[in-house]
Amino acid sequence: MSKKNYEDLPLSLAFFDGVPVLFFSMAMIILAMHVHNMCFIVGAVMISLAGLGKVIWKIVIAATKKDYDLLNKQLRVVMPIGFVLLIAGIVTELNEKQIKLVQQRICSFPAIVFFTITIVGMVLMSVFAFTLDSTKKRSHWIEQITNAIAQGCLLLGIFS
């Protein structure tokens, strides 16, 4: 299978791709202060590093016009494993009382608005993976703006 042509990706898009990674990583650092579980921490680090790998991939393409596809494809493997570990860490860490407290906080206002936007954004990202042309600059901007909003709302939800 031949490599896709990503030559028109601008450096501005590559750097903007780092915004959701930064928002997610900040959210996970805040949560890690409360969830002292190695599975959670390893999962959060894996997800953040997978996102950083994708950012580096876009920077390399934008700067050199060379596609090192492994930096892109690793996301499909590393990120799901990271999410499984992250969720396992949360599930094994929280007792019944803590689960009820988390549910109350998630469902409080304005947190519920932020978390709802996060979920909608992640659903849209899944839809975009199948419907948008990943070689097009416009598609990348749509994905990254959606992801930045979703991850920004995750961070705001955790703050609230």
Image (cartoon, rainbow, N blue to C red):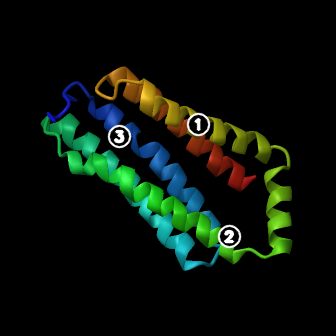
Label 2 sits on what residue type? Val
- Provide the residue designation for mark 2: 91
Residue 159, image quadrant? bottom right
> In screen coordinates, is 48 left or right of 68?
right
Labels 2 & 1 near each other (Cβ < 8 A) = no
Distance from the alpha carbon under mark 3 to that under mark 1: 23 Å
Identify residue type, mark 1.
Answer: Val
Residue 34 in view: no
Q: Earlier in the sequence, mark 3 or mark 2?
A: 3
Disc 3 marks which amino acid?
Answer: Phe
83 relative to 61 in the view: left or right: right
Q: What is the CA distance from the residue labelled 3 to the residue labelled 2?
A: 34 Å
N-term mark: 2 or 1:
2
Q: Kindly identify the residue that appears in the image at 40 percent across and 37 percent down.
A: 16
Q: CA distance from mark 2 to mark 1?
A: 22 Å
Residue 123 is tagged as 1
Residue occupying the point 52% across, 72% down? 41
Seen from the viewer's position, the closer of residues 106 and 134 is 134
Of marks 3 and 2, the one in the foreground = 2
Task: In the rendered structure, find residue 15 and report the number of the disc placed on it.
Answer: 3
